[in-house]
RNA sequence: GCGCCCGUAGCUCAGCUGGAUAGAGCAACGGUCUUCUAAACCGUGGGUCGCGCGUUCGAAUCGCGCCGGGCGCACCA
């Protein structure tokens, strides 16, 4: 059992004993919560137990704290005192710190991986951009955070699957095909009207050019309808491959690529049919409507148009139903903030199908604004359209781009400083962290040359400098940090943690030498920095940022 | 008008399951390289936590009402 749990039990036991002896009145014990105090002079752990119990015991917090402190018994406890409005601060015997570090070291590279949790599987669906254009920086934010969240949940022990929903059916794919067709004709010098709802991106022209490069003008002879049909498949395949390539370059991969088309082979019909059976569908103006107003929506929504075609919403209902049918217990979707008006109707559909809407969590990502030289960058110089993820990667690199997206929570708007992301100095947080990792790698190389051995049985109790103790405490808090960040779906906590750990290492480095000090101390310090390096590498791994050996 | 997100240091943001003197990075100022990477470290200054009311022993954190910014309110996706 961990020391924290032992301490919590001891506190509860002390309170019980105080009640039995009549020092405290009979009452239900509040939950024991332990925290690490803001300052190290305040001990190793603190609890607000006495303050929480003030109401139940009808006594003032300091009095209650007194009864606890005088009765608490725990072998590892050195002493406890009362502070401020009624906090109890606990000071543990020195070697507790080192026992925990030794355990962390013994866990090796597995440190930071939590035990498997026995819970229903989680699905994280993110990016899911339409295959009709290029990924832009907003998609990049979703991709970075989504993949970091998947990594985070996985190391925290959750069974998790990542998925990309490919919108390969419906209008926008028809528009894609028509746009490619128009560019194809254009490139071959044939007159044509560009479709009104067409995609005007330069990438569409590229796709058309690829077709000509490969097959020449052989499609000209075809009936237009047939040509567009062929182009649809060619374009879709090419655009999808581009998406996959861009994402892979950005360290983003998916367990599953889910095609919307597969839903139109019966699952959409089934879902609508089930809704109808449940009495929430009616017909009006030739269309089928879902009475989402029963579930708090502003207005009812069409699921099947008057032309018989299901709406995007209908497919989405079927998609979410399918996720639950595949056995996922928790669904997480990452959506652009501009889709938030959509959440009510999706949850309504889950409710109407008999699923618990609370099992679907939708995380919204707010806008990204790029800044260069203090000026807002709106458009790409190359394409005249939104800046693409590919351009961002070329500009600042994958590591910096990912880290900058990951250091902010999704739900606040992000100002991305391109100059800062490119800077190779401490101003740039991603270099700061990577540098800590590389510096440790360098120390290890130097230590080896100096005949200093990397040992596991070292005298950790020699690590008494303030900077050493701070670093040790940070390392020990890592699993807890993973647990908390995973629970809150908050990868940005790990970004922050990595930065703080790097900072503590840099301070240590300036103050404490390894090579050239007494052998036992040198060995202990070497073991410590190796552990720090492992934690930094692990955290960077969660973030999908590389951990260089040299910089 | 209705709904969602945001408002914390000069700038960009953490902190939000209520807890001790509200933190970090950048920017500003002043120091630190004969020794493991100065892509680093140490120090200083800087705040009505948008405003108001409420709940509480205790509110940046919870509730309500304003104000300001962003986004959305399709038989588009």
Image (spheres, rainbow, N blue to C red):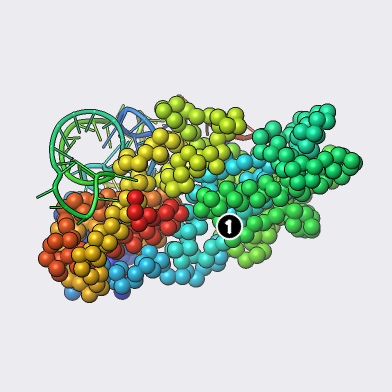
Could you say whether the residue bearing mark 1 is in a helix, strand or loop? loop
Residue A67 in the image: state x and y as whole percent.
17, 64
Which residue is at the front of the view, B21 or A212?
A212
Q: Quadrant of residue A8?
A: bottom left
Chain of residue at mark 1: A
Q: Residue at x 39, y 60 (%)?
A: A538
Left or right? Give the position of A490 relative to A442: right
Q: Quadrant of residue A263?
A: bottom right
Q: Residue at x 34, y 54 (%)?
A: A550
Which residue is at the front of the view, A224 or A75?
A224
Residue A517 in the image: state x and y as whole percent.
13, 62
Q: Label 1 belongs to which residue? A: A254
Left or right? Give the position of A185 relative to B23: right
Q: Residue at x 86, y 39 (%)?
A: A220
Which residue is at the front of the view, A225 or A115?
A225
Residue A10 visible to an observer of this rendering: no
Residue A32 visible to an observer of this rendering: yes
Q: Residue at x 21, y 54 (%)?
A: A509
Residue A526 in the image: state x and y as whole percent.
23, 64
Which residue is at the front of the view, A509 or A18?
A509
How many numbered callouts?
A: 1
Q: Quadrant of the N terminus of chain A?
A: bottom left
Residue A301 in the image: state x and y as whole percent.
72, 43
**A547 versus A130 height, above or below:** below
**A484 versus A107 height, above or below:** above
Left or right? Give the position of A199 relative to A216: left
User: How many other residues sit within 10 Å of disc 1, few (<14), some (14-19) or many (≥20)?
Assistant: some
Left or right? Give the position of A205 relative to A441: right
């Amino acid at each position: 059992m961990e020391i924290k749990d032992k301490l919590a039990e001891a506190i509860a036991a002390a309170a019980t004993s105080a009640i039995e002896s009549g020092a405290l009145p009979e009452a239900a014990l509040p939950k024991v919560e332990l925290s690490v105090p803001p300052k190290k002079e305040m001990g190793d752990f603190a609890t607000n137990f006495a303050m929480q119990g003030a109401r139940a015991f009808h006594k003032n917090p300091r009095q209650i704290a007194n009864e606890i402190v005088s009765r608490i018994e725990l072998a590892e406890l050195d002493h406890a005192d009362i502070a401020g409005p009624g906090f109890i601060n606990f000071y543990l015997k020195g070697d507790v710190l080192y026992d925990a570090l030794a355990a962390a070291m013994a866990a090796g590279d597995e440190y930071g991986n939590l035990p498997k949790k026995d819970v229903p599987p989680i699905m994280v669906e993110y990016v899911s951009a339409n295959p009709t254009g290029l990924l832009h920086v907003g998609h990049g934010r979703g991709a970075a955070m989504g993949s970091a969240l998947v990594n985070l949940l996985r190391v925290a022990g959750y069974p998790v699957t990542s998925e990309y929903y490919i919108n390969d059916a419906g209008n926008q794919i028809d528009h894609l095909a028509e746009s490619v067709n128009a560019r194809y004709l254009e490139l071959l010098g044939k007159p044509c009207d560009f479709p009104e709802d067409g995609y005007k991106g330069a990438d569409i022209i590229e796709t058309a050019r690829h077709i000509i490069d490969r097959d020449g003008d052989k499609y000209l002879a075809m009936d237009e309808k047939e040509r567009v049909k062929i182009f649809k498949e060619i374009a879709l395949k090419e655009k999808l491959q581009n998406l996959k390539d861009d994402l892979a370059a950005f360290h983003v991969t998916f367990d599953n690529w889910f095609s919307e088309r597969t839903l139109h082979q019966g699952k959409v019909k089934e879902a609508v049919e089930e809704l109808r059976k449940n009495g929430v569908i009616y017909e009006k103006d030739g269309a089928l409507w879902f009475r989402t107003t029963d579930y708090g929506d502003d207005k009812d929504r069409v699921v099947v148009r008057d032309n018989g075609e299901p709406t995007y919403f209908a497919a989405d209902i079927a998609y979410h139903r399918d996720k639950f049918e595949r056995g996922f217990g928790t669904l997480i979707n990452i959506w652009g903030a501009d889709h938030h008006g959509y959440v009510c109707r999706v949850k309504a559909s889950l409710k109407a199908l008999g699923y618990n809407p609370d099992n679907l969590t939708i995380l919204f990502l707010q806008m990204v604004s790029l800044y260069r030289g203090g000026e807002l960058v709106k458009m790409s110089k190359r394409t005249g359209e939104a800046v693409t993820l590919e351009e961002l990667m070329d500009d600042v690199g994958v590591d910096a781009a990912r880290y900058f997206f990951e250091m902010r929570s999704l739900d606040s708007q992000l100002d991305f400083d391109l100059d800062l992301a490119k800077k190779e100095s401490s101003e740039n947080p991603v270099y700061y962290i990577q540098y800590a990792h590389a510096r440790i790698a360098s120390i290890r190389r130097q230590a080896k040359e100096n005949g200093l051995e990397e040992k596991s049985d070292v005298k950790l109790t020699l690590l008494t400098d303030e900077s050493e103790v701070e670093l040790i405490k940070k390392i020990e808090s890592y699993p807890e940090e993973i647990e908390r960040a995973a629970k809150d779906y908050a990868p940005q906590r790990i970004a922050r943690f990595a930065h703080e750990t790097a900072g503590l290492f840099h301070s240590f480095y300036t103050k404490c030498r390894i090579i050239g000090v007494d052998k036992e101390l040198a060995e202990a310090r070497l073991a410590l920095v190796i552990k720090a390096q492992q934690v930094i590498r692990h955290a960077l791994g969660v973030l999908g940022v590389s951990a260089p050996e040299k910089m």
